[in-house]
Amino acid sequence: MKAGVIGGILAGLTAYTYTAGRGFPVVVILFLAYAALAHRERLLKRWRVFLVYLILTAAVSAWLYIYLRLHPGYDVRIGTAQEALGMLARGDYGGFLGAVRDTLAMFTVRGDLLGIENIAGRPVFSGPEGWLFYLGVLMCLWHLRKPEYALQLIVIAIMLVPSLLTEHPPSWGRSIGMLPALLVMTVLPVEWAWSELERVTHMPVSASVRAWLGRVALPLYTVLVVALGVSVYVRTAYDMLQVWMNHPGVYWMTYAFYSETADFINRSPDSTPLDFNMDVAVQWRMTNLKRPVNRRDVELRWTVNNAFVFPDNPHGLRVAFQMLAPPALALQQAFFDPKTPIYIGPRADPTGQHLLRIYDIPRARLDEQLAYAQQGAVFLPRTNMPVTLPVKAGDLLEFLGYRVLNPDVLPGDKLMVLTYWRMLQRPPDISIFLHLIDETGTPVSQYDGFDVVTDYVMPGDMVVQLHALELPRDLSNATYRLQVGVYLNDTLERLPLSVDAPDRVLWLQTWQPRQ
């Protein structure tokens, strides 16, 4: 029973590790189905252990699936898989068969083409270990009635499914759940050969044969295995530190974007703060920029795509970002001309695009935008009583104003709205929500987020957050209302406002779609 308890808890926690881990319950179900067919008596003897295992697996992992169900935006990769499944449902089998071909080719023919995370096109096995893998697969098929062999095949088959459903297969990152079985299969032939050598050495053969095996065969086998291991290690180290690191895209991630930005800051004649805008907030990215910057008079901030942070500085702000995933165009155009950067990095990617661009936002531009945002009407819900800004949200930040960038947008497109906030203290994990509600108060579209790395926010900083509201195509020709508020991500509790606002929200202007 202890095995069922420990195994069930660990299996449930697997779902929280990585997207591929959510396929692990399928592995368990298929393995139990296999056991019911091939080893029914053994399964029935331990049915209580397996029942406890399944119950605990479901109980531990259920909270993740409930959360993802309530917050679909956190699982964007599932959307890609749903598109592929929809293609199959429509009978488009040609594309799926091509995905199967490309995914199976990833082992020794052609691998993942995404050069940022691996060597583009390099298969998983680039040497003799590939043949060991195929021999391992054959051994698992040969010993299919043994559970330990059948399990490896089930893991490989299930963990390849995410790659089959990706937009451009194969995807090594999305197939990473098969790594344990992959290593096992590669080692199986080596282990079998060793056991066979040991068996022969204990056979009733002549002393001269046993002596020859002891002096030559076993040492030679050991040398070959060690040589294979060293070869794999050396090739992996060389590929990582030489081939992969010198890939233009990888070089940009590890050097050009960070070190070139730091060089620009270090030689700049002024101390204007800099916002480092990323596609994904990862701590090592912040570290890679901070380490080479030797200026202590330049404030650094970090945002993600849809926000800018303006420290309280008379010079304004400089914004650096990568060309792979620049800030939303609506946010760029509100503050600068994307065609006129103050600095363009010298390093280019294979298409000829320069990877680093830095823009200047003068303080006068921010003041101009803020003055425009402060003209937006704000009301108390239901009473329509006007509210004077700023309005505090808890003791963390205060609402300064907003601006609708494209009020003439059509249904099916995105309504772009900027909200302006001043930080009163470094906040915990929060979200600013902007809802577009109908006459009954029901949201028809919303954008929740705070696209700022809060670890580096300081009191007095001004945050401009872009909310991209996706409008339904069948949006009726009615009058809708914008409403805004702030909540804590861990508890979903809305922050109290410094005005007596029902539901802790503020009403903004009304909006009507253009037909």
Image (cartoon, rainbow, N blue to C red):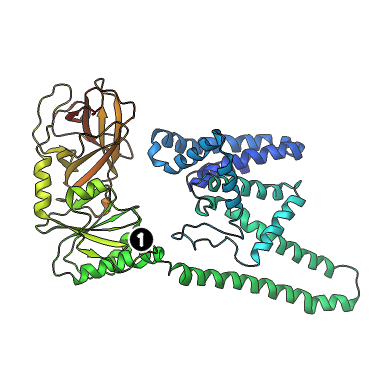
Q: Residue at x 11, y 45 (%)?
A: 370
Q: Which residue is mark 1?
A: 284
Residue drawn at x 77%, y 37% as measured from the top left: 41
Residue at x 46% of width, y 42% of height: 80
Left or right placement of residue 148 versus residue 431 in this view: right
Query: Crowding at label 1, few (<14), some or many (≥20) Cα neighbours within 10 Å?
Result: few
Q: Secondary structure at mark 1?
A: helix
Marks counted in the figure total: 1
Between 370 and 230, the residue placed more toward the observer is 370
| Observer-nearest of 187 and 174 | 174
Q: Position of residue 509 (x, y in %)?
A: 16, 30
Quadrant location, the C terminus: top left
x and y percent of residue 407 in the render? 20, 34
Q: Indicate whether 289 appears above or below 462.
A: below
Does 52 appear above or below 304? above
Q: Position of residue 241 (x, y in %)?
A: 46, 71
The answer to whether any part of residue 169 appears in the image is: yes
Q: In the rendering, at what x and y percent does residue 384 appear?
A: 13, 24
Does residue 382 sit above or below 335 in this rendering?
above
Q: Residue at x 76, y 65 (%)?
A: 193
- The part of the image, by quadrant, that contains residue 245 is bottom left
Left or right: residue 345 versus residue 121 is left
Which image quadrant is residue 3 in?
top right
Residue 5 appears in view: no
Q: Amino acid at mark 1?
A: Trp
Give left or right: position of 34 versus 464: right
Q: Nearer the viewer, residue 282 or 200?
A: 282
For the N terminus, the quadrant is top right
Determine the image quadrant of residue 344. bottom left
Q: Is residue 37 above or below residue 475?
A: below
